[in-house]
Amino acid sequence: MHGREKTKEGSSLVPGCTSMEEKPGQPAPEETPSNAPPGTVGRELFGYVGIEAVLDQMRIKTMKTGFEFNIMVVGQSGLGKSTMVNTLFKSKVSRKPTGPGYEERIPQTMQLQSVTHVIVEKGVKMKLTVTDTPGFGDQINNENCWDPIVKYIKEQYEKYLREEILISRKRKIPDTRVHSCVYFVPPTGHWLRPLDLEFMRRLSKIVNVVPVIAKADTLTLEERAEFKQRIQEDLKAHGINVYPQEDLDDDSDDRLLNKKIRDKIPFAVVGADTEHQVNGKRVLGRRTKWGIIEVENPAHCEFPLLRDLLIRSHLQDLKDVTHNVHYESYRVQRLNESNQLAPSPAAGLLGKHEMESNL
Amino acid sequence: MAAAEIARQVGESCRTVPLSGHVGFDSLPDQLVNKSVNHGFCFNILCVGETGLGKSTLMDTLFNTKFEGEPASHSQPGVQLKSSTYDLQESNVNLKLTIVGTVGFGDQINKEDSYKPIVEFIDAQFEAYLQEELKIKRVLHNFHDARIHACLYFIAPTGHSLKSLDLVTMKKLDSKVNIIPIIAKSDAISKSELTKFKIKITSELVSNGVQIYQFPTDDESVAEINGTMNAHLPFAVIGSTEELKIGNKMMKARQYPWGTVQVENEAHCDFVKLREMLIRVNMEDLREQTHTRHYELYRRCKLEEMGFKDTDPDSKPFSLQETYEAKRNEFLGELQKKEEEMRQMFVQRVKEKEAELKEAEKELHEKFDRLKKLHQDEKKKLEDKKKSLDDEVNAFKQRKTAAELLQSQAQQAGGSQTLKREKERKN
């Protein structure tokens, strides 16, 4: 199982006890040496209490309520976004041109299309929303093509904020906020283009951006490594904070894990949804004259890494960062600006509350 | 160029799509659990009951450890709440446990206000959370949640019925916190009396409309066990931290001359059931109920009290804005009025003081004038006297000189007469 599990067997010594009243603490009878910091009193459990059953309770509860995940894929047409989403979630969640006879019309204006599906795996229900952006970067003049995307993301935050401010609010607020935005970089092999830089710069401030190198089967391994290096330098030079953000690491375990991921960003991925026979097994891959590219083979492409990051190990973290960091900063900004202009519900709520409490 | 249209396929939403392989998000609950483990849990229990019913001992027994504290005295003037926080750790779960006990509950002669400190304490915790939630810059996910998740109400083992203090207190608390009533020191009641007591208690609670916490029965995995436990409420418990050797095991028990009561024996008392329900099965549900039911109710009442309302469904945010604008203006207007009032009062006071001072000044002036006049009068009198004296002196001097002159004249005349006489004699 991926994930940071710190398991310690048996009941161990308690780190500290803080008493919220001003009476002197009495040292408990200690039978084993305490490694608690000086000044705190250790509380030893004499036997099994069953506190850890709360984990199972939590597990059962979350399986019953299900999860929501909203992912957005951004990139120019023809980079394999829809295929990638289908490969990620192993089902036809994204509509895309199927055969060669289909004429793909490049839309005149950029649109955002959201499709919601429910997928179930081993009793875990997930409501997945994929937001696609056909037409991004396809026009001749691409100035401000990120505006609709930014507007869409902020609209979702606004929706959530409105629900949160209500007096009688729902038990579970429907979460349509974008949890991660996968940005597809065309495999030029050189550097990031100005469009890429502009887009990622603006969006990494409001959403978790995961850049990937699309159609990476056109790059050899050396070219891939160089390209990645240059992209990382570019990102650092422009101060673009992609997911996993450095300043959000909690402890050393996180930092170690995330550093490994950060060294590999952006992932070079290949998407495929047809199966082929390789060595007697059926694998997802692309068949070319010179060989079959296995999508799930770590030696061929980094798709497994992307999938592990997005789904198997960091999905909950993506949601948490969206909720605790991006949503909160949007909320701060929104409440501050509406405090100065026309008062909005929360500002009025807040302002009056603060004024009343200060009286 | 980028006039964007956001096209949502609503018709296709929530369609269940089959998976053709293993994706891997079945690890989601584990990811969530791991995050929670890293973050730590917190659980807050409030123990309400009269002094001497064994609240602290029960806490020690429940959590298998010795919390600090001496038994409280019976002479408290009022009910106070004493809260202590402990960090417990079991395998990889960190639990921040806060135990709040009532000190002096039921000890006063007049117990009318006994429930008030408890209700105020619970409200204060809700208020703290609400304040944090309403802030602009808030840190909700790191906020130390002190809201009470479970309230264990200790009923004295009289064997008859609930005391009126119990009924009143529970009625006040049932909409604010999850109440779990338990019969304390239940080794004082025999088995048959116990069943009658339980029936009496539950019927009294129902007839008075007290809503105690029901263990949830909607999830199949715990529905059965919760259902049977619901029937055993209130739990009759015994607490003990002493271990005695029974058979060949060390067990927690209380020893009497007539036998030994084992705490963990289900035939002897319901302690095991309480522990199961409180910790092992429903801890998460207790926390959830506190957050979604009791806290939301408090929040709604508090915000409505402050005058905020969700408006009618057709004009949601905008008329809200107007309402808030109006309210804000009204409030500002009130403030301004108050300021004006204060200013006017100030001005008036100043005027009054000024008038007073002026009067005092006038008086002083008058006094001064009077004194001056007096002084002048006296002076004049004295001068008059002096003048008259001077006159007298002058007059006297004149008479003196006149007298002297006369005398000298007389002497001369007499001298000249004598001379004349002598002359005549000579002749």
Image (cartoon, coloured by chain):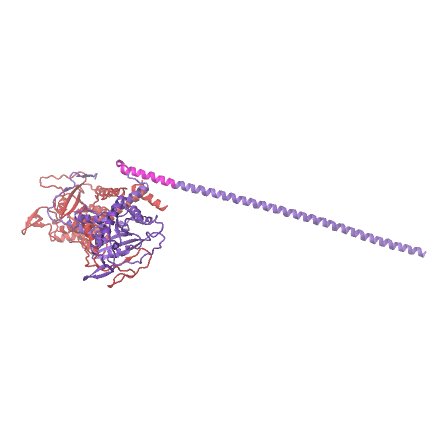
Chain colours: A red, B purple
Q: Nearer the viewer, residue B414 or A22?
A: A22
Residue B292 position within the rendered picture, expressed as x and y whole percent measured from the top left: 25, 46
Q: How many marks?
A: 0
Residue B145 position within the rendered picture, expressed as x and y whole percent measured from the top left: 27, 51
**The N terminus of chain B sits in image quarter:** top left
Is residue B141 in view from this perspective? no
Q: Nearer the viewer, residue A124 or B195?
A: B195
* Residue at the extreme right: B427
**The C terminus of chain B sits in image quarter:** bottom right
Query: Of helix, strand and loop, which mostly describes the magenta segment?
Result: helix
Is residue B27 in view from this perspective? yes
The magenta segment is: B311-334
* Residue at the extreme top: B314
The quarter of the displayed image where residue B325 is located: top left
Asked if residue B326 is among those painted magenta in the image, a careful observer would answer yes
Name the residue located 55 percent from the left edge and 45 percent from the top edge.
B361
Left or right: residue A272 versus residue B258 is left
Q: Nearer the viewer, residue B340 or A32?
A: A32
Name the residue located 19 percent from the left edge and 61 percent from the top edge.
B247
Left or right: residue A139 versus residue B354 is left
Residue A27 position within the rendered picture, expressed as x and y whole percent measured from the top left: 29, 61
The quarter of the displayed image where residue B333 is located: top left
Asked if residue A220 is among those painted magenta in the image, a careful observer would answer no
Residue A45 position within the rendered picture, expressed as x and y whole percent measured from the top left: 23, 59
Left or right: residue A86 versus residue B269 is left
Q: Nearer the viewer, residue B67 or B10?
A: B67
Image height of A38 relative to A290, above or below? below
